[in-house]
Amino acid sequence: MTTTLAQWLAAQPVDQKLASVVATMADASAEIAAVLRLAPIAGQTGLAGATNVQGEAQKALDVISNDIVLNHIRQNPEISILVSEELDEAVHIENQGGFMVATDPLDGSSNLDVNVTVGTIFSVLDARKGLLQKGSAQLAAGYAAYGPATSLVLTFGASTAVFTLDGSGTFVLTVERVTVAPASGEYAINTARERFWDAATRGYVAENVAGETGPAGKRYNMRWVGSMVADIHRILMRGGIFMYPLDSETVSKGGRLRLLYEANPMALLVEAAGGKSTTGQEKILELMPTGIHQRVPVILGSAEEVERVEGWYARG
Ligand code: AHM
Ligand code: MG
């Protein structure tokens, strides 16, 4: 017997207003999936001709995806604030309820022209507590991965569930409780940045490259899609570690990936599935943000691998 997202949400021991916020993001994701599927035919894979607040060139689909999310959010009276990678400022919607959504509407959009998996990442918070809250205050988090199948991965903090979009536009439960394998032989990092790395990152990766005859005592494989949602989805399904550490080039910005709508939701999803997350020095979910577009170092995945990286950082 199949369980739809609506049935699953109704059975969760959470405020059903909160459940409706998650359903809204699922609806937005299904609409984005439909647009992406036909984007090359519609000629939408190129640039929009604008740059976002981070100074990055916006793709037409970045803008379209952001508009789809905003439209859906406006229709749900429970959501009063939207923070988006694509919008300089938070959007406040008057006379609406108590929830805030922080989102990267289309993560990995530099991969669009090569038809690689991209995704929508989101975090749900209590809007009454302000824009800047620790990741541990998240009420829910999730992402949609637009791959061969469209997957929706959700957590309310206790466990992580995976849904798959069927042909009629309904998300169907496909993994009730996903577990990040505690041990793994796969790591994901952009090795072209090696010259910028700190000693801890160099030390950990060198051990992996040394393989079964090195101190790690086993063989490793490297995988880097360059699309965070795709890399994290692989780690949720079969283990591994994802690293975008602080390096000498990103240090002035605080890191590469954004705390509110990339690091925090992914950290909650991975931890609720039994994995670990860290900046190397601190727990991602305990960081107090200083700005809505703040960047942070991100290291997350299989517990044993994250602990090995933490061990390297602890050596100083
Ligand atoms: P984006 O939000 O502008 O798409 O950037 C985030 C992406 C992540 O999906 C991915 O992990 C990372 O940037 C890839 O970085 P790099 O270009 O160094 O490989
Ligand atoms: Mg992004």
Image (tube, rainbow, N blue to C red):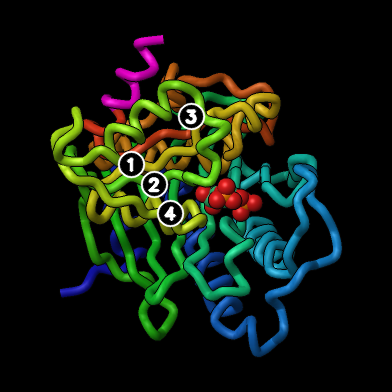
Q: Quadrant of the N terminus?
A: bottom left
Name the residue at 69% across, 58% down.
70
User: Does the Cβ of the disc 2 residue fall within 8 Å of ligand 1?
Assistant: no
User: Does the Cβ of the disc 4 residue fall within 8 Å of ligand 1?
Assistant: yes
Name the residue at 57% across, 56% down.
107
Residue at image mark 3: 135
Label 1 or label 3, whichever comes before in sequence order: 3
Residue at image mark 4: 224
Name the residue at 33% across, 45% down.
187
Q: Which SS class for mark 4?
A: loop
Residue at image mark 1: 241
Label 3 or label 4, whichever comes before in sequence order: 3
Task: State which region is magenta.
Answer: 307-316
Instruction: Judge whether residue 219 is colored magenta.
Output: no
Mark 2 residue type: Ala
18 relative position to 107: left or right: left
Residue at image mark 2: 188
